[in-house]
Image: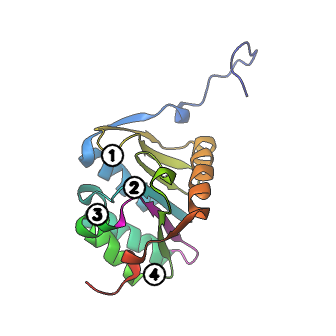
Amino acid sequence: MSSAGGHSESQPAPAQTPESVLGHVEFTERALAMARSARQEVIICSHDLDRRIYGDQSLVDALRKFLLEHRRGRLRGIVGDPRAAMRGAHRMVELSRVLSSRIEFRQPITATASMAGDCIIVDQRSLLLRSDPGELEASYYADAPGLAREQLRDFEQLWQHAEPAREFSDLRL
């Protein structure tokens, strides 16, 4: 739907305007708020599950609570470099081992088949995007179902052509 030349009196919904999120601390705070509001599914795309974010105990606890309180709740993730994630976000990896029936992480089969940056999608509604793992700024959309579904379609394409991240299910610690 194009907004150019439209005769609609309504303005784009404020929810479509992203909130700027600066640094890993704010990124973690937004991710935590999203996890606490989750009811059905949490999607995570990350190059290496940055320890400063995904190793945060509060975030891991919120995800654990979500998965245990919501019978159909699940977490799916694509991690570009699972070996690096094993060295960094051990709490998230441990959670995936403990709740393996509710959490699945996959890795792209080829290096070119990965998503750029980090992305968290909750319940096909809220979205946290960082275009590059090295970037300090991210965009948070509290209520953007259209954009969240668009990102989810990209995720699903990667998911279908990814393989299980075996490092996450291997019981050696």
Neighbour tally class for label 2: few under 14, some 14-19, many 20 plus, Cα within 10 Å? many
Q: Residue at x 24, y 48 (%)?
A: 25
Which residue bears the numbered disc 3?
Answer: 84
Quadrant housing the N terminus = top right
Q: Which residue is drawn at 37% across and 41% down?
A: 132
Neighbour tally class for label 3: few under 14, some 14-19, many 20 plus, Cα within 10 Å? some
Is the residue under label 3 in contact with that under label 4 (CB below 8 Å)?
no
In x, y percent, where is residue 161? 59, 62
In x, y percent, where is residue 135? 30, 38
Quadrant housing the C terminus = bottom left
Which callout, 4 or 2, points to the residue nearer the camera?
2
Which residue bears the numbered disc 2?
Answer: 46
In x, y percent, where is residue 99? 43, 81
Tell me the amino acid under the disc marked 3.
Answer: Ala
- Magenta part of the chain: 70-82
Q: Which of 4 and 30 is in front in this view?
A: 4
What element does badge 2 sit on? strand
CA distance separating discs 1 and 3: 13 Å
Tell me the amino acid under the disc marked 2.
Answer: Ser
In the displayed structure, 55 sits above or below 69; it is above
Residue 38 visible, this orientation: no
Which residue bears the numbered disc 4?
Answer: 100
